[in-house]
């Protein structure tokens, strides 16, 4: 049973527009959430994280929103750039653990 | 600083053979993790070392998989004997204790069992 779900396998966005990637989770014990970006033939690279005590965290063009009541988080990329084209993974961990539970990823394509 | 290094980058072996994957974490990182991604699915946790001790090996699929981290430096993951369903990309990652910035992943080893 998947505890972290990314229901959109792919997303295409025009350069300069907003990209919104979504992630849902089922385990209420999760208290820390991360987004990773992955290019082909490379390992995932940490992008941004959020603790469950917050509902928003921003880093440059990237913002993560957390809705704990809905068990939903989203990653906003504004403005989107062609170099953002990659697979984005949502991940979660529970307090006191270092194990991350990943989603299946969303492939973002930013069109020039 | 050097990143997480994994060897080999690709391996193709026949069913029933043995393969050993190696991971060199970032120097000074006590935490080392193995993950696997099969057929474009989610990246799944295999196990976690703290120094040379296995902290959590709840994700190891079965006893054909053996992970070691002698001396608390590099780690190896041996698959013996390999089965077709073991094919996938094996990622190693490392981190400092208590980091809020996630792990640093290696580029992975793509294992194909034929």
Image (cartoon, coloured by chain):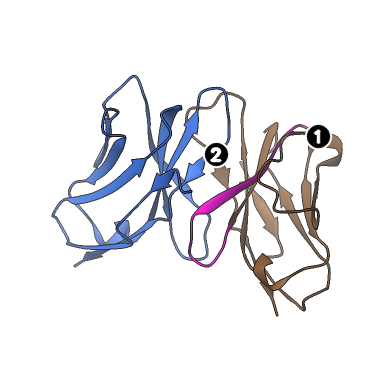
Residue placed under numbered mark 1 in the picture = B52
Residue A43 falls left or right of residue B47: left
| Residue B102 visible to an observer of this rendering | yes
What residue is shown at x 83% (from left), y 72% (from top)? Answer: B17
Seen in the picture, residue B33 relative to B111 is either above or below; the reply is above
Which stretch is magenta?
B37-53
Of A71 and B36, nearer the camera is A71
Quadrant location of the C terminus of chain B?
bottom right
Q: Do labels 1 and 2 share a chain?
A: yes
Q: Does the magenta portion include A75?
A: no
Residue placed under numbered mark 2 in the picture = B103
* Apparent colour of chain A: blue
Q: Distance between the residues labelled 1 and 2?
A: 18 Å
Q: Which of marks 1 and 2 is nearer the N terminus?
A: 1
Q: Residue A60 at what x, y percent from top left?
A: 26, 37
Residue A55 falls left or right of residue B106: left
* Apparent colour of chain B: brown
| Residue B26 visible to an observer of this rendering | no
Within-10-Å neighbours for mark 2: few <14, some 14–19, many 20+: many
* Letter of the chain that mark 2 sits on in the rendering: B
Of A82 and B49, nearer the camera is B49
């Amino acid at each position: 049973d998947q505890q972290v779900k990314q229901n959109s396998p792919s997303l295409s966005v025009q350069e300069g527009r907003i990209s919104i990637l979504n992630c849902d989770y089922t385990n209420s014990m999760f208290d820390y959430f991360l987004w990773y970006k992955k290019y082909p033939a490379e390992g995932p690279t940490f992008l941004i994280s959020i603790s469950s005590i917050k509902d928003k965290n921003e880093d440059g063009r990237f913002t993560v929103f957390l809705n704990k009541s809905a068990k939903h988080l989203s990653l906003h990329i504004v403005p989107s750039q062609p170099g953002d084209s990659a697979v984005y993974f949502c991940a979660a961990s529970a307090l006191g653990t270092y194990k991350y539970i990943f989603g299946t990823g969303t492939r973002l394509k930013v069109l020039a | 600083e050097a990143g997480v290094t994994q060897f080999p980058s690709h391996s193709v072996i026949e069913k029933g053979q043995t393969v050993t994957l190696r991971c060199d974490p970032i120097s000074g990182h006590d935490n080392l993790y193995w993950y696997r991604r099969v057929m474009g699915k989610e990246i799944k946790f295999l196990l976690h070392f703290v120094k040379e001790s296995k902290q959590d090996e709840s994700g190891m699929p079965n006893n054909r998989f053996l992970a070691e981290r002698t001396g608390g430096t590099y780690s190896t993951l041996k698959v013996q004997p390999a089965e077709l369903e073991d094919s996938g990309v094996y990622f190693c990652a490392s981190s400092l204790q208590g980091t809020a910035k996630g792990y640093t992943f290696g580029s992975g080893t793509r294992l194909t069992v034929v």
